[in-house]
Amino acid sequence: KAKTVETNSRKEDRSDGSSWLPFARESELSEDGDDDDEEESGTALESVIRHNLGLIHAEMGRFDQALAEYDTSRRIKIALAGDTHPEVASTLNAIGALYGAKGEPERALAHFRQALYIYRLHSAELGEDDPDVVNTQRNIRLIEKSGLKTGKEDRLTMM
């Protein structure tokens, strides 16, 4: 039976109605909510769309296409909000899940651990009980319990 590795989704409700863009800068949105800032790095909306396209491709088994979409989403999020924003962690967690599904545990663990580090930076109130921290720790345990062994070349392999 295949194990399910969950991805994280963090929404921040804001009074300005932009909860669908949890990390959007005010300068990115016009009065009517349309995106007027055509930065070379992409927009917050594009990063959300790319992340969701990655989810769709992953569900359809198109892992290379999913990875490309996730990576684009991750790069845009970093450009807009910095490399320790929880939205970056969400995409890192999704990439980890994708690598787990592809049978690449080293890469999966690296992405999950990076996501966990970011989530812990932002979990001051809830600490280890933060749902994103709990979910990412669960993903790490799933990969670790899936039969990782160190091979002769000191590489982890999934059995």
Image: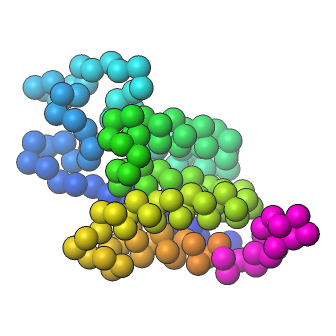
State the residue at coordinates (67%, 81%). Answer: 145
Region rendered in magenta: 144-159
Taking the magenta stretch, the answer to whether it contains residue 49 is no
Q: Is residue 29 placed above or below 83 in the rendered structure? A: above
Query: What x and y, as percent, mark residue 153?
Result: 88, 64
Q: Residue at x 75, y 75 (%)?
A: 148
Q: Quadrant of the C terminus?
A: bottom right
Between residues 5 and 57, which one lies in front from this camera angle?
Answer: 5
Q: In this rendering, would 156 be left or right of 58?
A: right
Query: Residue, x 33% and y 35% (percent of image)?
Result: 80
Q: How is the image coloured?
A: rainbow
Magenta stretch contains residue 146: yes
Where does the image place residue 47, in percent across and percent down from the top left? Answer: 40, 37
Q: Where 121 sits versus 81, above or below? A: below
The answer to whether residue 8 is visible is no
Place of residue 33 in the rendered image (x, y in percent of width and height, measured from the top left): 17, 30
Question: Can see residue 77?
Answer: yes
Residue occupying image coordinates x 32% and y 58%: 10
Residue ranking furthest to the right: 152
Which of the two residues, 24 or 51, is positioned nearer the viewer here? 24
Q: Quadrant of residue 121?
A: bottom left
Quarter holding residue 20: top left
Please determine whether, in this image, residue 31 is positioned above or below residue 17.
above
Q: Position of residue 14 (x, y in %)?
A: 14, 49
Determine the image quadrant of residue 1.
bottom right
Query: In this rendering, would 156 be left or right of 31?
Result: right
Residue 100 appears left or right of 152: left
